[in-house]
Image (cartoon, helix red, strand yellow):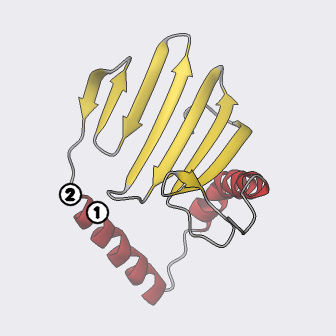
Amino acid sequence: FLLGSLDLLAASLWRARQPARPEELEDEAIIHARGGGAWVRLACGRAGRKHERVVVETTLGRFVTDRERGTREDVELLTCPRAWEQALVDQLDAFVAEARDAARHEPAVWDQLPAMAFIERAYGLARLSLPQGGV
């Protein structure tokens, strides 16, 4: 969103720190992209503690953000301790209320299609390089 359109460069799926096989559910996904004059690395994972992290490398430095803090060249810029479990409950409550009341937010849905198409391309690219069955 902040960098504008991203060019997908590489994507990979991992399970227990090894490349995931097609039949496995990955526990980490990594996307490398370029856009807005910056290199971007997006990493999401479920191994152990759930984490999501975005790394942006520009001529101004390396910026990293996750669920709890943001840094520039490993110097903390901000912290955002939150009750993530409560945020999830609130989102699910809102979803149920909208579904029950047949409330639709069409513009919000259509706005997300480019991001979903990017994610779909990334998963397709990652699946191309996954090891195939066997040991």
- The residue tagged with tag 1: helix, strand or loop? helix
Mark 1 = which residue? Answer: 87
**90 relative position to 106: left or right:** left
Quick check: 124 above or below 60? below
Q: Position of residue 77 (x, y in %)?
A: 28, 23
Q: Residue furthest front?
A: 135
* Residue at (56, 10) in percent of width and height: 59
Image quarter in which the C terminus is found: bottom right
Assess disc 1: are there few (<14), some (14-19) or many (≥20) residues with their C-alpha within 10 Å of its C-alpha.
few
**Any part of residue 70 in sight:** yes
Quick check: 58 above or below 71? above
* Residue at (58, 46) in percent of width and height: 30
Query: Mark 1 belongs to which amino acid?
Result: Ala
**24 relative position to 9: left or right:** left
**131 relative position to 16: left or right:** right
Q: Position of residue 130 (x, y in %)?
A: 72, 57
Quick check: 103 above or below 127? below
Camera-nearest residue between 95 and 23: 23
Q: Position of residue 8 (x, y in %)?
A: 73, 40
Camera-nearest residue between 55 and 109: 55
Q: Which residue lies furthest to the right in this view?
A: 128
Mark 2 = which residue? Answer: 83
Camera-nearest residue between 26 and 68: 26
Q: Which residue lies furthest to the top in this view?
A: 59
**Any part of residue 101 in sight:** no
Asked if marks 2 and 1 touch (Cβ < 8 Å), the reply is yes
Query: Mark 2 belongs to which amino acid?
Result: Ala
- The residue tagged with tag 2: helix, strand or loop? loop
Q: Where is residue 71 in the image (x, y as percent from the top left)?
A: 34, 25
* Residue at (40, 82) in percent of width and height: 96
Q: Which residue lies furthest to the bottom in this view?
A: 100
Image quarter in which the N terminus is found: top right
